[in-house]
Image (spheres, helix red, strand yellow):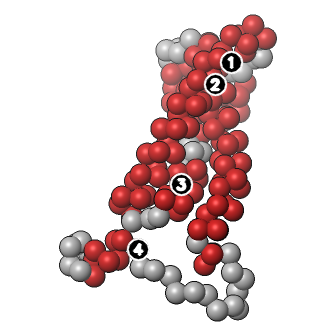
Amino acid sequence: FFVDLGTKIVFDAEVVTSVIPHTLTLLAAVFVAQVASAAMAARYTAGSSWPEAMLIGFGMLGRAELAFVVMDIAYVQNAILSREAFYMLMFTTFLLNILVPLTVAWWKPKYVRYDPWHAMPRGFERPKRPRDRSFRLLHEGRLDR
């Protein structure tokens, strides 16, 4: 599957340069939308703190498998996508996957400063961790099990 899809990419300099502005625009929009939606979901459904929620949001950026399946169906099997749209989506998906480890590595020091519990080596006395919002709501009887 991935080999078949990869063989459809033929690097034509004219097509590649023509899709760069669209790729960067789509990359920025998808990056903001995916990180924000995953972070807000973690914040408001799991009661995570904002640093925890942002770390979850950055970790959720890499969703290439589904995008590749859709591109295979739309471009290879049914010829619905144009060549330029295929290249734009392929490059955007590729760049989003590259951004996952970079953004997690960039955000982790900020997260550890917020929550030093995760930075302490094993064997050391760990500070008591405050209960999260969902635990408190469950304990107060305002959240179903």
The reply to whether discs 1 and 2 touch (Cβ–Cβ < 8 Å) is yes
Q: Which residue is mark 4?
A: 132
Tell me the quadrant of the picture where the C terminus can be found: bottom left
Which mark, residue 24? Answer: 2
Whichever of labels 4 and 2 marks the residue nearer the N terminus, that label is: 2
Label 2 – label 3 distance at C-alpha: 22 Å
Whichever of labels 1 and 4 marks the residue nearer the N terminus, that label is: 1
Camera-side residue: 4 or 111?
111
Which element type, helix, strand or loop, lies under badge 4? Answer: loop
- Residue 100 in the image: state x and y as whole percent: 65, 47
The reply to whether discs 1 and 3 touch (Cβ–Cβ < 8 Å) is no
The amino acid on which the numbered mark 2 sits, given as a three-letter code, is: Leu
The amino acid on which the numbered mark 4 sits, given as a three-letter code, is: Asp
Which mark, residue 20? Answer: 1
Q: Taking 120 as reference, is 60 left or right?
A: left
Give the vertical position of 94 relative to 123 (above or below): above
- The residue at 51%/26% (across/down) is 73
Camera-side residue: 32 or 76?
32
Q: Which residue is mark 3?
A: 54
The amino acid on which the numbered mark 3 sits, given as a three-letter code, is: Met
Classed neighbour count for the residue bearing mark 3: other residues with Cα under 10 Å, few (<14), some (14–19), many (≥20): many
Tell me the quadrant of the picture where the N terminus can be found: top right
Label 1 – label 2 distance at C-alpha: 6 Å
Label 1 – label 3 distance at C-alpha: 28 Å
Camera-side residue: 7 or 115?
115
Which element type, helix, strand or loop, lies under badge 3? Answer: helix
Label 1 – label 4 distance at C-alpha: 43 Å
